[in-house]
Every structure is written in C-alpha cells, then in structure tokens.
Image: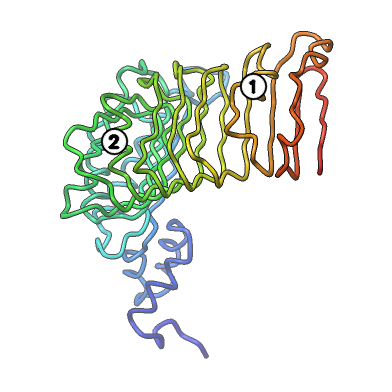
Amino acid sequence: SFRMEDLPAEVQPVIMSLLPLKEAVRTSIVSRSWRTLWRFHCNLCFDGPNDPDSDTDDEFAGQDSTKMKRAKFIETVNSVIQQHSGIGVNKFSIRCGLPKEDSHHLDRWISFATSLKAKIIHFDLIIIDWPLEEVHHFPLEALDAQGGSFVQSLFLAAVSIPHSGIRGLTILRRLVLESVQIFGDFPGLLAKCSALEDLEIIDCSGVTNLSIPHKLDKLRHLLIDSSTTDIEVVELHAADLAHFEYKGRVIPIVLHGCSKLEKATIMFVDTKALAHTFTAVPSILPVRILHVQAIISKYAQLQKLPTIPEGMFMNLRHMTLIVEMQMTIMKFFN
C-alpha cells in the first residue's frame, strides 16, 4: 500500500503544499512522521476577522467577540511564522482588519515575508475603526533590501506607501493598489518597476496627475478606478498595452503609442460622458473590443452622439454600450 514515507523526502513537503495551509496543519496530526511537513508549506495565506459582528443584538458582545477572534488570529499567524522552516515560501498573504494598537504585529509579518523573499506578497489591511490618515505604512524599501529585488506580485490595500530609498523592484510583474495613500513621486516609483505587466490602481489618494512613464514598455494591462479619488489626468506611454480599463469622472486620457491595444473598457461617471468617450479618447478607437458605460440624464441624449467618421472602427469586432436607466445594449460587428 502507498505510504507518504515511501516518497523521497524532498517530494513530501511539495505534496503537502498542494493543500491549503489550514488543511496541511490538520493533516500533520495523522502520522508522527508527518508532523513537520506543513512547516515547509510554500503558500502562507491568512484570512482574519474584518468587521465587528453584525448578527447579534448586543453591540458590546459583538465587539468582544470580534476582539477575541482577532486575538486568536494574531496568535495563529505568529505561531505559524515562528514554527515555519523559513524555506521555499512562494506567497505570503494577510487579509484582516487590525486596529492601530496592533500595528506592531504587521511589522513583524512584513519583516518575515521580506526576509524569506516571498515572490507574492498580499497585505489587505481592511479599515475598521480608525481614520484613514492613520493607516499602516508599508515599507516598500524592505522589498529590495535583501540583496536585490525578489517580489513578482504585490497587492496592497488600506496602507500608505512612502517610497524613499527604493532602488527598483526590477522583477515586479503585477502591482495592485487599493485604497492606498501614495506619497511622493509615484511615476518615479513606477519607472523603477521595469518588468511590470499588470498595474491596477483602485480608489487611491495622493495622485492627481497619473503619468505612466516610457520605461513600462512591458505593461499589458492597466486598470484605473478613480470614482472616489482626485485623479485629474491620465497619460501613459506603453507600447505593449493590450487592455485598458478606466472608471471615474470625465478627465483627459492620453494613450501615447499604444498601437497594440486590443480591448478597452470605459466607465465615465458623468451625465455628459457618452460623447466624450468617442471624441476625447481617440487612442482607444483602433481596439477590437470596446465596452462603454455612461450615464445620461435623458433618453434624448442618445441622439446627440457625435458623428463617427467612416472607417474609424475598422478593427472593431465587438462593442458594448450600456447607458444607465435605459440599460440599452448595442453590439456592432464589421
């Protein structure tokens, strides 16, 4: 009969890593010889409590329950990183809501992830009860302070990123920032991420003129959701950009030299946005797939669409137009 012990020693932790971390730890109690296998798990992902309990009539009981869950979560994470072998960590993920007084635990977890050079780092620090201006500062400089760049995918939510001292995240391929406070020269920071292929900026503050530098010549996907932020201009130079997405107010959008653009999704939150899509964002017109969503105040405004010159949509294979209220959907094929 098959036994895990019959496999080579280097293969056993690999098999255990195919399980979620929680299940791998549970499996370790099955056999004495398995007890240490989970300590080589390559994906350390932790989901903790987020918001206070809402399914109880006693508000204070709910708060106490949440505090107990949070304390248990912190204890679990600290126990795992203390017992882990420190070898072969691929992903380190924390998703939780922590009050300001527990921020020292975050410093420890960040230090652990960076010291082991995790390729994927995910910190979603859900805001629960303190002002946004007091969010935790994520030390980006730690990502290239361990003898060179190592992180390939970085997701940050509800933190701030002062980035003084960053030499360059030269192998970073995916960057997602959600509800992040950005300080300093953000385009300068992006210019140091020369391998970036996927960039998503969602409801971030601190940037008004979002300029994507020439050096991001490998960027394939760009998503900007500025519905609740103050971005006033978007300008980028990305020769390999294939998919562009924007959601927010009507602002100038200039895409320089994006000759490989295949798909564009535009969602303007403005009653005068429909015509603006076709007249003020000419760079999106050569795309093959175009999705446009806009708000109009009256159905009659549909009649005010700008005249589209013949041949403007020569490459278009699919177009979706969604107008709020009427929810009119039109598809065009040439």
**Relative to 287, is 135 above or below?**
above
Mark on residue 189?
A: 2
Give the structural element (helix, strand or loop) at label 1.
helix
- Residue 85, given in percent of the width and then of the height, sits at 25, 63
Residue at 31 percent across and 55 percent down: it is: 118
Examine the rendering and report whether any part of residue 19 can be seen.
yes
Give the structural element (helix, strand or loop) at label 2.
helix
- Residue 283, given in percent of the width and then of the height, sits at 57, 33
**Relative to 17, is 224 above or below?**
above
Q: Residues within 10 Å of mark 2 (few under 14, many from 20)?
A: some
Q: Nearer the viewer, residue 41 or 270?
A: 270
- Residue 80, given in percent of the width and then of the height, sits at 31, 53
Q: Earlier in the sequence, mark 2 or mark 1?
A: 2
Q: Nearer the viewer, residue 23 or 106?
A: 106
Estimate the spatial distance between the alpha carbons at disc 2 and disc 1, rounded to whole Å: 32 Å
**Relative to 30, is 7 above or below?**
below
- Residue 323, given in percent of the width and then of the height, sits at 76, 22
Q: Amino acid at mark 2?
A: Leu
In the image, is 167 to the left or to the right of 171?
left
Using the rendered view, name the quadrant where residue 279 is placed.
Answer: top right
For label 1, the residue is 279
Q: Amino acid at mark 1?
A: Thr
Examine the rendering and report whether any part of residue 55 can be seen.
no
Q: In the displayed image of the protein, which residue is found farthest to the bottom?
A: 1
Q: Nearer the viewer, residue 30 or 172?
A: 172
Residue at 83 percent across and 12 percent down: it is: 299
How many numbered circles are shown?
2
Q: Residues within 10 Å of mark 1 (few under 14, many from 20)?
A: some
Mark on residue 212?
A: none
Residue at 70 percent across and 44 percent down: it is: 315
